[in-house]
Amino acid sequence: MEVHPRIQIDPAICGGRPVIRDTRVPVAIVVGGLAGGMTMDELAREYDLSADDIRAALKFASQRVDDESFHPLPSQAA
């Protein structure tokens, strides 16, 4: 399945988790690294990625969150 030219989802690669195309670097690692304080330059060096790869991972994650359905929790009566 192709969801973005730089993102690949293949059951034979990393159990079907979304990865940067032609790598085994999961999108979750990229997003988590940025959330944890890594810079784009650090991620690029650590995982041999381009800035476009990192931006694609962020775009993919953003689209997935936007596609999700969220249901408010019922308020608790006091």
Image (cartoon, helix red, strand yellow):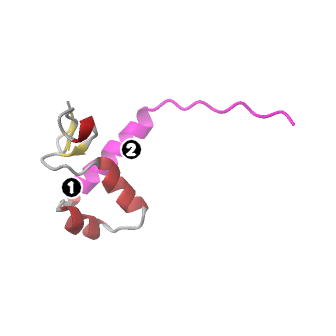
Q: Which residue is mark 1?
A: 52
Left or right of 24 in this view: 31? right
For the C terminus, the quadrant is: top right
In this view, the residue farthest toward the right is 78
Work out which quarter of the rendered image holds the N terminus and state it: top left
Q: Residue at x 23, y 45 (%)?
A: 19
Q: Which residues are magenta?
A: 52-78
Residue 28 position within the rendered picture, expressed as x and y whole percent measured from the top left: 34, 49
| Residue shown at the point (84%, 33%) measured from the top left | 77
Residue at numbered disc 2: 62
Residue 74 falls within the magenta-colored stretch:
yes
**Circle 1 crowding by C-alpha within 10 Å: few under 14, some 14–19, many from 20:** few
The picture places residue 25, in percent across and down from the top left corner, at 23, 51
In this picture, is 57 found above or below 8? below
**Image point (36%, 44%), residue name:** 61
The picture quadrant where one finds residue 4 is top left
Total marks placed: 2
Q: Is residue 24 above or below residue 37?
A: above
Asked if the residues shown at circle 1 and circle 2 are in contact, with their CB atoms under 8 angstroms apart, the answer is no
Mark 2: which secondary structure? Answer: helix
State the residue in front, 55 or 15.
15
Tell me what residue is drawn at x 27 percent, y 64 percent: 43
Q: Measured along the vertical axis of the image, is residue 69 above or below residue 46?
A: above
- Expressed as whole percent of the image width and height from the top left, the position of residue 50 reads 18, 60
Amino acid tagged 1: Asp
Q: Is residue 77 magenta?
A: yes
Q: CA distance from mark 1 to mark 2?
A: 15 Å
Task: Quadrant for residue 67, please give it.
Answer: top left
Q: Is residue 68 left or right of residue 24?
A: right
